[in-house]
């Protein structure tokens, strides 16, 4: 089996073969990282497959191999939404960790940004997030809020955070540095949410849903245009049947900023990874 020739059909067959590992394992005669990643996934060894994918990304994969690895990661996520990808737990001082990739579309342009947040007992002094081997995405001290919550983000990236291998390092007072590998899937090429008019939007389906993961959530926020802290005046998150219009709101007459985001979530072990497509625009209330 060639390590360079896994097509969509082959990935579908691999998915079906996950339930017959003893037969599928006989396919593999080569001993390389790409073969190991496929074989481990076929045999239900998801975390070993993840480790092989990480090592394969470190070998400067070709375009075909990159597509192969991205498809394999997406396939592995369908098992349990990524919980089994990485068996390494978060350190005891870090109780939660979220990596959020967002594409913000206003009326003129699309602005990619990346946000990392979590909860830590000691003060987090720095966060570094690099696309392997040396492309820095974030390198700074996060904001610290009540309850040990910390957050850091980067805006106006030159391009969306691509698929591939990233290294995350978090430093905190009095604790050993936490360093881990993160595998990101390819960002969606299709904008699934878009404006119809100033109060209504459309949401397109994205093929068959991944039933192992939570349903998409619609995050709606209204902001005061004059508040530079961007603290929402109104916010609501909805799952299940997603609305396509803003409800009537009890706000003083005036112009506001409306943000509507389609949130898809998965996991890498204990790390939560969110992909968000957000549309924003000024709106007038009331405007009924």
Image (cartoon, rainbow, N blue to C red):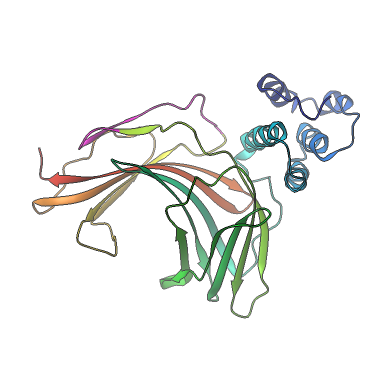
Q: Nearer the viewer, residue 46 or 51?
A: 51
Taking the view exactly as shown, the residue that stands out farthest to the front is: 158
Picture residue at 31% right of the left edge, 43% below the top:
106
Where residue 118 appears, as percent x and y from the top left, is 51, 62
Is residue 231 one of those drawn in magenta?
Answer: no
- The residue positioned 55% from the left and 31% from the top of the image is 210
The residue nearer to you, when weighing 190 against 86, is 190
Q: Position of residue 259 (x, y in %)?
A: 30, 46
Q: Is residue 201 above or below residue 56?
A: above
Check the picture and name the quadrant holding the N terminus: top right
Q: Magenta residues?
A: 195-211
Specify the quadrant of the image occupied by residue 35: top right
Q: Residue at 63% of width from left, 80% of height from top?
A: 174
Q: Nearer the viewer, residue 33 or 162?
A: 162
**Placement of 171 over or under 62, stated as above or below:** below
Q: Is residue 23 above or below residue 280?
A: above
Q: Residue at x 49, y 24 (%)?
A: 207
* Rendered image quadrant of residue 90: bottom right
Quarter holding the C terminus is top left
């Amino acid at each position: 089996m060639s390590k360079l020739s896994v097509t969509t059909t082959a990935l579908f067959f691999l998915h079906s073969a996950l339930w017959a590992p003893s037969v599928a394992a006989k396919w593999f005669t080569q001993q390389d990282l790409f073969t190991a990643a496929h074989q481990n996934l076929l045999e239900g060894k998801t975390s070993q497959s993840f480790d092989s994918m990480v090592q394969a990304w470190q070998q400067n994969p070709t375009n075909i191999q990159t597509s192969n690895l991205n498809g394999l990661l997406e396939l592995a996520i369908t098992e349990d939404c990524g919980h089994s990808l990485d068996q390494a737990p978060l350190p005891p001082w870090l109780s939660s960790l979220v990596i959020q990739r967002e594409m913000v579309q206003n009326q003129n342009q699309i602005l990619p940004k990346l946000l990392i947040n979590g909860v830590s007992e000691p003060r987090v002094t720095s966060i570094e997030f690099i696309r392997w081997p040396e492309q820095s995405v974030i390198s700074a001290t996060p904001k610290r809020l009540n309850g040990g919550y910390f957050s850091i983000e980067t805006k106006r990236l030159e391009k969306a955070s691509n698929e591939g291998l990233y290294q995350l390092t978090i430093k905190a007072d009095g604790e050993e540095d936490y360093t881990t590998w993160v595998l990101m899937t390819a960002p969606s090429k299709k904008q699934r949410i878009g404006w119809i008019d100033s109060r209504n939007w459309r949401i397109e389906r994205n093929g068959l849903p991944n039933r192992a993961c939570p349903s998409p959530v619609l995050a709606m926020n209204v902001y005061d245009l004059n508040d530079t802290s961007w603290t929402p005046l109104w916010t609501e998150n909805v799952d299940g049947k997603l609305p396509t219009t803003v409800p009537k709101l009890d706000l003083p007459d005036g112009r506001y900023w409306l943000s509507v985001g389609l949130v898809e979530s998965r996991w890498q072990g204990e790390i939560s990874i969110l992909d968000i497509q957000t549309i924003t625009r000024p709106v007038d209330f009331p405007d009924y």
